[in-house]
Image (cartoon, helix red, strand yellow):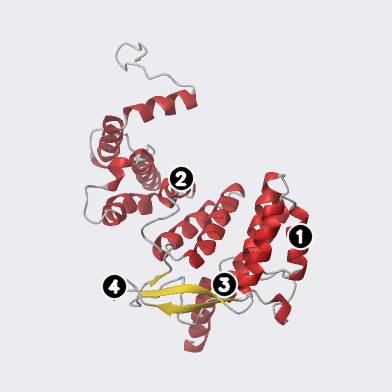
Amino acid sequence: GGGGGGGRGVRRQVRARSIPPPPADQWPPLSTAAHHPHLSMRSVQGPDCECDYFAYEWESGYAELQLMYQECVNSGDPNTIVRLLAQYPYHVESLLQLAELCKQTGDYERGADLLQRALYALECAFCPAFHIATQRNARPCRLLYQNPRNQVFFHAMFRHIQMLARRGCCRTALECCKLLLSLDPSDPLSVVLSIDQYAIRSRSFAFLCRFVDEFLPQAEHGAPNAALVLPNMLYSKAIALYHMAQSKLQAEGDEGEAGGEGESSDRDFGSGEWAEANAALQCAVAVFPRALQLVLERAKQTLRNPATGAAID
């Protein structure tokens, strides 16, 4: 009934606010004062009235904790950071620093745990009005990177994206890329250089085409299509269009078999979706011919003349 639907809606909202998994049993409790991350978030004045802007702020004692952390970093001894975390287990910068060290030494499991604990501490500082998943008809929330105290959130999320990609969770990595772009559309960490990879690997082809056509020009404030300076976007859009045309062909073939025709549709590369994919690839090659050469070298392939079979240098 109606009550059940409302409960599911509440659960969806709660789930949308959570970035990492729930806190692990072995993590220290946040209930004690010594374990508190000393971070909070407040609403701030933004450059426009169309969005709600927020910023992290340091609570009492965090500045001194930052000085202790810098002393540990300057010492060059990772054990000093370990000891600092034993006393302050939710100090975000220390968690990120130790997580990076674990990644460099191949201890990915411990590094992932430290990174998720840092994200959990950052999430616990969210104020009630800050929603990372914007609801329909709600004003977008912004967390601008230019504020130095917001930067740790972006760094943590960016490393989280890399960790997700390493685990093969490309759809989740894609959603996290969308989150960073929604919080600061200026893209301070250049997420746009990798979002197409995660979109293709998660088979989000339609999204990628819309992203190239709609978001990138907007990101350049009315300038010519930003994809024209991003070879990855032009080539990835061509790949996405190709897969979409291939999926449509397969669907038509399945319908034909169900109807008793017994044969799938033939490819007509000069019409419809195939023509659009070919045009996108030709545009990518015309704008970035050097990128095609690099792709062929990486794939250990040679471009050949379809009529003569001779290699094209």
Question: Does residue 238 lie above or below 297 as drawn?
Answer: below
Q: Earlier in the sequence, mark 2 or mark 3?
A: 3
Q: Earlier in the sequence, mark 3 or mark 4?
A: 4
Q: Earlier in the sequence, mark 4 or mark 2?
A: 4
Q: Dot 1 surroundings within 10 Å: few (below 14), some, or many (20 or more)?
A: some
Q: Earlier in the sequence, mark 3 or mark 1?
A: 1
Query: Mark 3 highlights which residue?
Result: 123
Q: Earlier in the sequence, mark 1 or mark 2?
A: 1
Report how far apart the C-alphas of labels 1 and 2 lie in the structure. 35 Å
Query: Mark 2 highlights which residue?
Result: 197
Q: Dot 3 surroundings within 10 Å: few (below 14), some, or many (20 or more)?
A: some
**Residue beneath the point at 62% across and 69% down:** 120
Q: Earlier in the sequence, mark 4 or mark 1?
A: 4
The kind of secondary structure element at disc 4 is loop
Question: Does residue 296 lie above or below 71 as drawn?
Answer: above
Indicate the amino acid at tag 1.
Val
Query: Mark 4 highlights which residue?
Result: 48
Task: Residue 25: tell me if it is visible.
Answer: no
